[in-house]
Amino acid sequence: MNETTVGALFIVSTPIGNLEDITLRALRVLKEADIVAAEDTRRTLNLLRHFEISSELVSCHAFNEHRKVTEIIGKIKGGKNVAFVSDAGTPGISDPGYLMVREAIKEGIEPIVIPGPSALTFAACASGFPIDSFTFLGFPPVKKGRREQFMKKIAERGETVIIYESPYRMAKLLTEIAESSGGDTIVAVIREATKLHEEILRGPVSEIIEKMSGRVWKGECAVVISR
């Protein structure tokens, strides 16, 4: 009786906006995969259709991740090649992916990482700030007490800090930065990176607050706080 050959797990980076940013290697892996496991199947389906990729698509997001990871690892051990993608960018960077990688390693499956687009590296480069040393803190907490501690931690850092924020809380975040670190704190706000309405705002946080007064924030945002 022949033993089943174990498949492979590919952690695939996908465009954060502009579809032309996908790599040739990522396209090949997505085309050759038996299964594409996606955080948002609707968004990933648009990507696959654009590049005429017909691999089987299954969901794996924050609300079903534990169960789905077990199922997917089982399929890999059964010989299937699986490509895992998040909404956009690099899985595991403030997106699902860590659990998949951890459990695969536990099962003796070495994940194959396909590098590519990332909102984090885009923001670091586009800010124009020193990035030889920086701290990435992901999304700020929503609850008041934890959020206050989070902002205090940013103010105490002696290096550039990069965070993400929802457009619904961007005005609040900038005010919090001004209150905790001072209105002269230099920041860069990267909005809708690589997309049609990409916008980068740089300068003292007080000036950006004034400039954006009355405007409705839209799109995904990364904020770089200079030190």
Image (tube, rainbow, N blue to C red):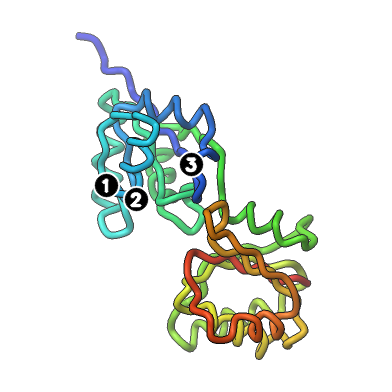
Q: Amino acid at mark 3?
A: Leu
Quadrant of residue 161 within the rendered picture: bottom right
Disc 3 vs disc 1: which is toward the camera? 3
Q: Is residue 18 left or right of residue 74?
A: right
Pointers 3 and 2 in contact (C-beta within 8 Å): no
Name the element at disc 2. Answer: loop
Name the N-terminal-most of marks 1 and 2.
2
- Judge by depth and name the residue closer to the eye, 195 or 118: 195
Residue 21: percent from the left, percent from the top? 55, 40
Q: CA distance from mark 1 to mark 2?
A: 6 Å
Please report contact status of discs 3 and 1: CB closer than 8 Å, yes or no.
Answer: no
- Residue receiving disc 3: 19
Q: Work out how far the residue at label 3 is from the one at label 2, CA to CA, in angstroms.
A: 17 Å
Confirm or deny contact between disc 1 and disc 2 (CB under 8 A). yes
**Image coords of residue 11 (percent x, y):** 45, 38
Q: Amino acid at mark 2?
A: Glu
Position in image of residue 218 (x %, y %): 47, 70
Above or below for 201 versus 215: above
List the residue tagged with mark 2.
39
- In this rendering, position of residue 3 left or right of residue 48: left
Nearest the viewer among 60 and 207 is 207
- Residue at mark 1: 59
